[in-house]
Image: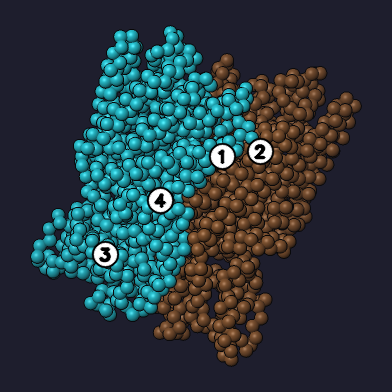
Chain colours: A brown, B cyan
Amino acid sequence: MEGAGNENLDERSALLTVENSSDYTGGITARYTLNSERRYTPPPPVGSDTQPEEEQHCDTQLLDVKFKSLNYDTCENTLFRDEESAKSYKEVLRLQMSRWLVMFLIGVFTGLIACGIDVSIKYASALKYSTIKHYMDECIKTNCNSIPLLLWIAWNTSGVLIAAILVVYVEPVAMGSGIPQIKCYLNGVKIPRVVRLWTLVCKAVGVIGSVVGGLAVGKEGPMIHSGAVVAAGISQGRSTAFNLDFKIFEYFRTDTEKRDFVSGGAAAGVSAAFGAPIGGVLFSLEEGASFWNQALTWRILFTSMISTFTLNVVLSYAKGEPWNLSNPGLINFGEFSNLSYDGFEIPIFILIGAMGGLFGALFNHINYKLSVFRKQYLSTLKWPNVLEAVIVASMSAVAAFILIFTISNCRSLGEDENENPLQLYCEDGQYNSMATLWFQTPEESVKSLFHNHPGTYKPVTLLLFFTVYFLLASWTYGLSVPSGLFIPCLLTGAAWGRLVGILLSLIFPDQPWADPGKYALIGAAAQLGGVVRMTISLTAILVEATGDITFGLPIMIVLMVAKWTGDLFNEGLYDIHIRLMSVPILQWEPPPITSNILASDVMSHPVNTLRTIERVGRVVDMLKNEPHDGFPVVEDDSENDGDHFGSFRGLILRSQLIVLLKMKIFCEAESEQTVRNRFSKLKLKHFREAYPRFPSIEHIHISAHERDCLIDLTPYMNPSPYCVKDSASLPRIFRLFRGLGLRHIIVINNHCQVVGIVTRKDLARFRVWHHRGRMGLEELQISQSVRSTR
Amino acid sequence: MEGAGNENLDERSALLTVENSSDYTGGITARYTLNSERRYTPPPPVGSDTQPEEEQHCDTQLLDVKFKSLNYDTCENTLFRDEESAKSYKEVLRLQMSRWLVMFLIGVFTGLIACGIDVSIKYASALKYSTIKHYMDECIKTNCNSIPLLLWIAWNTSGVLIAAILVVYVEPVAMGSGIPQIKCYLNGVKIPRVVRLWTLVCKAVGVIGSVVGGLAVGKEGPMIHSGAVVAAGISQGRSTAFNLDFKIFEYFRTDTEKRDFVSGGAAAGVSAAFGAPIGGVLFSLEEGASFWNQALTWRILFTSMISTFTLNVVLSYAKGEPWNLSNPGLINFGEFSNLSYDGFEIPIFILIGAMGGLFGALFNHINYKLSVFRKQYLSTLKWPNVLEAVIVASMSAVAAFILIFTISNCRSLGEDENENPLQLYCEDGQYNSMATLWFQTPEESVKSLFHNHPGTYKPVTLLLFFTVYFLLASWTYGLSVPSGLFIPCLLTGAAWGRLVGILLSLIFPDQPWADPGKYALIGAAAQLGGVVRMTISLTAILVEATGDITFGLPIMIVLMVAKWTGDLFNEGLYDIHIRLMSVPILQWEPPPITSNILASDVMSHPVNTLRTIERVGRVVDMLKNEPHDGFPVVEDDSENDGDHFGSFRGLILRSQLIVLLKMKIFCEAESEQTVRNRFSKLKLKHFREAYPRFPSIEHIHISAHERDCLIDLTPYMNPSPYCVKDSASLPRIFRLFRGLGLRHIIVINNHCQVVGIVTRKDLARFRVWHHRGRMGLEELQISQSVRSTR
């Protein structure tokens, strides 16, 4: 389906942007004069920018035509009504129960996967660091320091190599944290292969590789994607990867139901990652769900709870302390209960928030430039991507090695917990605390920065660590490996936050409030907020990960200020990556001052319509030649027959037509009885079975003889799809689209004739640009896939 | 407006329920045959019930016609488009800033009101209890026990008298917690006078009276209502109570903007009440917002934060410890940090949750029966309501007095904190712990039950206290006083929870996990969850009030099980009261198995339509005779002119027509120039100024001469309101209505002719009933206001 009719796609996008007036009906032309009232402010010239203008345009001002919409609108055709009529309240209850059961299973499996990843990383990392430590301790005496360095590089590159190969050669969609992809999915965009089993496998194995490979990544972000895949898999009751169909949960094989479960899965992922069930629910809401629904939210909370509980119980066994429920998430920030804050610290928090916003914006800018570069020069190639990942992995080892050997920050053993203390050039009974930061997983380093004794780190240690890690992290996100963004942000933030804390304790000596660990927490929140720009879900997540409500208010303040500051410069990193993917995502609200843009301006037209009773040949030709996924059905006996602007009757989907053609539900003149039999056997079941991978029209054989048959579309079309009048404004259509999760809206004129069709891309094209304090409206172009599959 | 056309209302409701088929157009009759397919299961006979059948029917199966809908749909007429065209992006930004500013002010004022209430109650209660204690201590020696009893009764009755008089004679809508009313408001129902200044005054003063009056009520619930009033007041930039107009925030004088601010106010109220900013946001979402919006949620979080912060700072000054930020809410549950739980306790938590559900359902049942009784016999009367409140106040004193003197539960002084320890018949150096439970505000008693030493309360003390307080509380909610439901639920729950804890510590002696205080917390959550049946927001609220995330999982489990158990028997108490108010509230989802009910079945018809150019006289007559708030506008030159089923052009609101008539925007033949001048002066401003209390048609003078003028509705009507085809199903219309917050949907046929109109009440009429394990669909009747204003 994806490849079908590409030539026409180009034609259509040309139509969309160039041809803006047609006179298919007399009544409409008048309205086009309104167009002149539209006040598009043209984007400012990019003159001073060194980046070649066209290339940049090509990268961020396109919507990729390959992304289809999910369909959340029920098609209320005769088949659906028949099925509903046959339903009893008992079945309604049974369905409800199944939903809870599926959510339960999603929670359990997400928790188990999180456990698996956690335990694997733990053992592999322990092995890695103890081996290297062994050689380090040896070589410091015999001066063979190149051996541990090479060993370290070997460990890093081999881990990252596995991750990169899985991503580049097996499943490219498994790269990164997956949060932008899940955000798009919940927004209603079908990202190809994003919730497939192989994606999960690559993601889970890959993230172990990249964390063990010592990259500046976390394992938390990928958990969200993993949870979503688990949800999609379980709720459909089958696996296409293994060609298995358990014949259960068949009712859930629609976009609407699947999306609900995927929101649950994403929440379960967050919950398992951070031990934050409420944070998980809020994440699903803030980042995804356009239609809030109370009952669904309860189920999401339930699955989040189950997920963190499963993880907690299994990890308690894995750690040899059964039922000691102290591991609600993959990371928790440890106890802060001895710390508090005073009212006068609030201005300091606000300043830290602003710093977080600045650092975050810088991070995003660097990462954006790198990503644009990657997209232009690397996205079509395979091995250079693997190579880049391997280079970064080696660089991480080398940078760490150099820092460890340059900075001598000695501390007495025993004051702080660490598993692999490195003595290096310190005296006996001491260890190097710079080495500690590098010589454990990033999660452990975050905890060290939060909780180690105030004097553990010298300012210069923190400053250098921060600088190097910041650059490494901004280089790393976007590599072709599964990688979480939360932990590197927390770690860099904790480093500079702790630095602020140390400065404060120097300015205000002997003040208990000037605690470096506390300021490390605040800094971590600020940096994370500055990069991802979430507020409400992030507040809940961080508070739950802290396990203490005390720092709720400071965290909230810091996140909000960080968001405000960062938004002055650029968007959140996930949004930047979504824009780079050219996904037609719909924002929460229509762009401002667009009330003068009317349906007749945004719609695609002319539209190819079908008649209620149509020739099979025409249906087949239209499916072959038109890329669209929905076709308006009009009254057969319309007056202006030639143009098919007949009176509007309904909407039929490509997938429905395909199933109808495949099952040959059309009238062959000779045997009406056969057709009626076939018809009576056709159930919604057949459509669900084909979901979501309906065959392409090329795979359906229609004989020349059959092409002359007639097909009655009335029982299968949606007889009352949402439609608007051509005088409806863009914000109105936008709200309808966003509020109800639509895929098509039919535009009709005053005489109920179809004059156009509005799809997601027609709306997503209108976007507000910000540039050096000015803002305006821009229209994006719709193009074919910018580059192949990546 | 409310009183207009009452006779016609009856007629209309008759139309709705009786006349279900009409043949105004040929194409539709066929569709009515589908009606026979509808499978309404008739509600089962209420045979065995002692309650007279008809009366019960009258009370719960009606929708009160007095409740109008709020209108969240923008009318995109020429005036609106002109205003939008004139807008610049700078103004868009300015508006955004104003929204944040308003939210800030809402937070500050809500916090201040909470402070005022808190401090007043604190001082008045301290005075009350110390006075009574004085006489008690005296009289125990001289045997004059009737003096403290009478004094106690006097204190109680005088407090409650103030509260009851304010509610009964000044502002009846201030009664109760106000949560059901706010829930309805956020759902889109206009509850008369619910967000007026006088309501706030009565609520705030009244709640002080009822808490000081010793009723089984809390001050937390009313804070939510107070926050909502503050929000509505500030966002409109004027006070109609004082006839003040500050001429600011004029843009926000629409239902949509006002609703957004009211959600923020409600959240700020929760936040101030419980120190739970995230809980506040979730409350607004769970109970209200049908359209989730990211930017709005951030603002809501901001106002919540400001509100709890203001309260915290001001209370720290009031308590003489400036900037010691330890009072985030009106109630906080104190430190639980020394406690934890083990995995094997989870089954116990589940059992407690189930108990909470049972007790909650019992509470709701008792309260429901009492409320039905009150509605039937007391609702039209004034002084009996005051009397009832006073009786309950005296009863509370008497019950407490008897319990204190019957149960002798002596404990050493100094082991537990309490402000007014009563010695009574205990030995010197001891005090009566039963007396402690009664001799402080309920908030303090909750904390005592959570934190007092394990041996403080004997089981019999707790059992008797629970029984008496449970009955008192279920009698109290629904009295004509402002009263919160959270605290009495927490208190009864804490009592039986602590009892469970004591039993467990007897069964498992010397086990540190069997802590009565911890189980008091779990029990409190269970009881509250069993009564109100919220889960996600309540989890956040309770966790934030505890200040510790440790009990997050147990609280979640308990709330969820309590909800499931309770839902087997009846609805949550707020929903019960909403049903008793006969409010046409829309649930989150359409009732199941209603896909066979079509628009043509639910719509009101025939509809009175207006022509695009209409005679003023006809407009006036229609406004006088028709109670509706929206009228479809049809093409003037329609074919079937007599019936006005012309081709659909737009929708015009009653309020718009009133303003047009008032400003005399119609063509007097003699001076077209004048009209054009008047027309050019007409701005959206004029509509906003009249909002929300548009004059009634009776107050607009139209001379006989003017009646013959013509009025052109085209520039003022909404040219593209949402409409559906007559074949659309109930769930489809429901989702459109709920998702976009509509007030009217026009039903058109295949030829774009108006065939009917669907309003909120037409949809709210369809409801699922549950009865002894069976369920089915019922259709409610729409009636005139069941009884007068109450």
Q: Is residue B727 above or below residue A127?
A: below
Q: Secondary structure at mark 2?
A: helix
Q: Which residue is mark 3?
A: B14
Whole-percent x, y for residue A96 in the image: 54, 55
Residue B89: which disc?
A: 4
Quadrant in the rendering for residue B199: top left
Contact between marks 4 and 3 (CB within 8 A): the answer is: no
Q: Residue at x 43, y 67 (%)?
A: B39
| Left or right: A132 in relation to A770 | right
Give the CA separation, mark 3 to mark 1. Answer: 49 Å
Judge if badges 1 and 4 mark residues of a common chain.
yes
Disc nearest the viewer among 3 and 1: 1
Q: Residue at x 47, y 41 (%)?
A: B358
Give the CA separation, mark 2 to mark 3. Answer: 60 Å
Residue A312: which disc?
A: 2
Q: Is residue A692 above or below residue B451?
A: below
For badge 4, the amino acid type reads: Tyr
- Category of crowding for the residue at label 4, using alpha-carbon neighbours closer than 10 angstroms: few (below 14), some (14–19), many (at least 20): some
Q: Secondary structure at mark 1?
A: helix
Q: B32 and B422: which one is in front? A: B422
Chain letter for mark 2: A
Sequence-first tag of 3 and 1: 3
Residue lying furthest right: A142
Chain letter for mark 4: B
For badge 2, the amino acid type reads: Asn
Disc nearest the viewer among 2 and 3: 3
For badge 3, the amino acid type reads: Ala
Contact between marks 2 and 4 (CB within 8 A): the answer is: no
